[in-house]
Image (cartoon, rainbow, N blue to C red):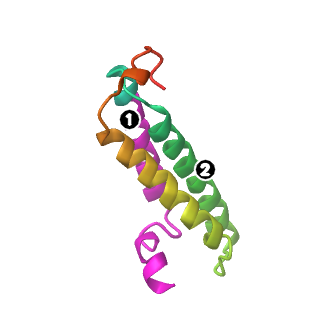
Amino acid sequence: MEIFFAPVQFFLMHPERIAVLAALFFVASLGSFVAGRRAAPTAIASVGWAMCAIWELFCKNQGYNIRVDLMLVVPLLFVLTGWGFISLFQPQNAESIDGDGF
């Protein structure tokens, strides 16, 4: 389990770092939308990380140090982050050229 949670250690109890990552995904989703590419995966990842920042701020203010919630939150964030990151590098296909960015 230590290897699984190692990438998240940088963000634990630091909601400001999580908010920066959410902002980066938001900027990436805006860039994808302006470029006419699928923006939904990066937008969803941005919302996921923003919600995580709010939750982490709450946990930090309450002084929670035993975090069972991370067993659900971390895998979900890994999936959202991977999906959003991979979508940035996927070539645009004919079905996504309908102009709505999704």
Disc 2 target residue: 51
Which three-letter amino acid code belongs to the residue tagged 1?
Val
Query: Which SS class for mark 2?
Result: helix
Residue 48 on the magenta span: no
Count how many numbered circles sit on residues in the image. Answer: 2
Q: Residue at x 36, y 37 (%)?
A: 28
Query: Helix, strand, or loop for circle 1?
Result: helix
Percent x, y for residue 52? 58, 56
Going by the numbered disc 2, the residue's amino acid type is: Met
* Residue wearing tag 1: 27
Instruction: Estimate the x, y position of residue 31 in percent, counting from the top left.
Output: 34, 29
As drawn, the residue found furthest toward the front would be: 94
Nearer the observer, 20 or 89: 89
Residue 90 % position (x, y): 32, 39
Q: Out of 74 and 10, give the one closest to the viewer.
A: 74
Quick check: 32 left or right of 16? left
Q: Which mark is residue 3?
A: none
Q: Residues within 10 Å of mark 2 (few under 14, many from 20)?
A: some
**Most extreme residue toward the top, as rendered?**
99
Residue 53, by quadrant, is: bottom right
User: In the rendered structure, which segment of residues is drawn in magenta?
Assistant: 1-30
Q: Give the crowd class for mark 1: few <14, some 14-19, many >=20 residues within 10 Å.
A: some
